[in-house]
Amino acid sequence: MILFHYIHKNSLLHRMDGRLKLLCLLLVSLSASFASVWWQYLLLMSLLIVSMVIARLPITDLINDLRYFAVVLVFVLLVNTFIACVDPTTSLTLKPVSMPSFHRGWHFAGRLVLVILACIVMTGTTSLTTMKNTFEWYLQPIPYIPKARIATMMSLSIVFVPLTLDCYTETSNAQKSRCVELQKNPVKRAILLTLPLVYRALQQTDEIVYAMQSRCYSESRTQAEFQTGKTDWLVLVTCVMSFLACLL
Amino acid sequence: MSDNSVPLLETQSLTHVFADKAVAIKNINLKVNRGDFIIIAGANGSGKTVFVRHLNGLLTPSKGKVLIDGVPIQKNIAVTRRRVGLIFQDSNTQIIGQTVAEDVAFGPLNLTLPVVEVKRIVQDALAAVGLTEHANRNPHTLSSGQKKRLAIAGVLAMRPDIIIFDEPFTGLDYPGVIQILQQLVDLHQAGYTIILITHELEKALAHANRLIVLDQGELVVEGSPAAVIHLVSEYGVRMPLEHVEKTSSLTWLR
């Protein structure tokens, strides 16, 4: 599985200044949340697919890996189609299906797909060191917070997504090889999968902490050197224009 | 400090008790001299991994202390971790970078070395383990043997004095074992002090000058391989000498 993994290439997006790239991710995510008509979705989808092509990311493999999110997308679609939020603080009720609610469900699922694709472009083209340095740079103006620690935690949490997905695949396959499908109760199956997954994730976390400590990890590391090229600004301008197109 | 009378690394009454009161290691006294090649053997659960994790300060002892050049390691834990490199049993958990080169650079960047120097160190370390052509690969896609070599490169990039290998042959095929063993012997010949945890003595004992056996957290055997080899089977380690007489024949390198 290569979803959310960094894939090393020498492309425009790989060389791009991490600070501008993170800004682009933010803009595309915001654009997705403002999108409401078909051409806006199409615009953002085209932008992201072109980005993946420019970055020479293995699109077919990535889309294949996205099947793990199909369940989440169907869930989002169903929730938005069938649930009416009468009073968000007190109750949720089932409502009859109507075209507007069905459309609303599609909108939410579509936005989620766009955000996932934007994250794939970001994680696929940005190394962990650049990611950490970028977070740290953005946190710099905020006083009284442990910037380096927060930046490390944020970048590591991104590393943990593919590791956890890998762990999920492995645990799931191990259980399938022992006929877990014969267990008809979906709750029990979910518990059977979740418990070892959480246990392994915690174990893995411990080991990574040891590995980092044994190689002298500290919050004062070699300072980052950012370089911004003209094409980086061009990418940012493209994202700003897309954002405006979705906002208006 | 380079006083030859002072051991490079020393443990004094080293004891570790877990939170559930289980005693992992008990009163271990050991001196590691510069240029030593020490093999630590013992059955599963004998405390080998817990012991070596004290040697570079990853674990804090419940009692006793670890000294490097005669100075307690707690005085400067960062220097200790640089000088005592540890190769974990599971190389996957040691991978931090998202490319091979980035992973090797992790340590030198922690030492706040300039970027130009880090690049040179990474190239040297990758060349030393034969991974130069894989510098831009995703480390998780390497073979088990290559991952072990990557872990070695990551440690070499820290310029250590001592390298500890925690069961490096686990999960490797025959060529993989040969490659890692050769690497280990080369490093020793290059001047590194080596501590190797393994219970497969037949693979590497010929290269060691000392053999240590742990049993239920206690150091029960210590001496030159030839002198103590006949004792190992009492402590859950396979006696490798059956039809041969000399420990010098116990290697997979021919």
Image: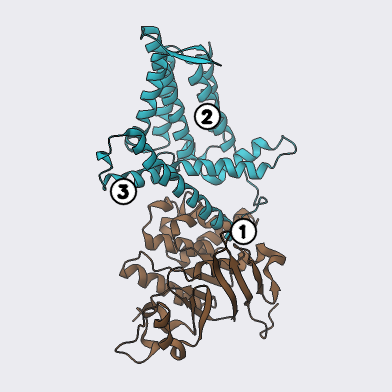
Chain colours: A cyan, B brown
Can residue A63 be seen? Answer: no
- Look at discs 2 and 3 and give the one toward the viewer: 3
Which residue matches tag 3? A174
Q: Earlier in the sequence, mark 1 or mark 3?
A: 3
State whether residue A143 is above or below residue A50. below
**Is label 2 in a helix, a strand or a loop?**
helix
Q: Marks 2/3: CA distance?
A: 36 Å
Residue located 64% across and 57% down the image: B113
Q: Amino acid at mark 3?
A: Ala
Kindly report the distance in space between the C-alpha atoms of the residues bearing marks 2 and 1: 32 Å
Give me the C-alpha separation between circle 1 and circle 3: 36 Å
Circle nearer the viewer, 1 or 3 = 3
Question: In the image, residue A178 lies at what x, y percent?
Answer: 26, 48
Quarter of the view holding residue A155: top right
Of residue B14 and residue B147, the one placed in the foreground of this image is: B14
Q: Residue at x 46, y 54 (%)?
A: B100
Q: Residue furthest right?
A: A144
Q: Is residue A119 left or right of residue B121?
A: left
Q: Which residue is mark 2?
A: A25
Q: Residue at x 65, y 52 (%)?
A: A221
Q: Residue at x 53, y 53 (%)?
A: A206
Q: Is residue A200 left or right of residue A152?
A: left
Badge 2 density bin: few <14, some 14–19, many ≥20, Cα 10 Å? some
- Residue named by callout 1: A216
**Mark 1: few/some/many CA within 10 Å (<14, 14-19, 20+):** many
Residue A53: which numbered mark, if any? Answer: none
Q: Position of residue B48 (x, y in %)?
A: 50, 70
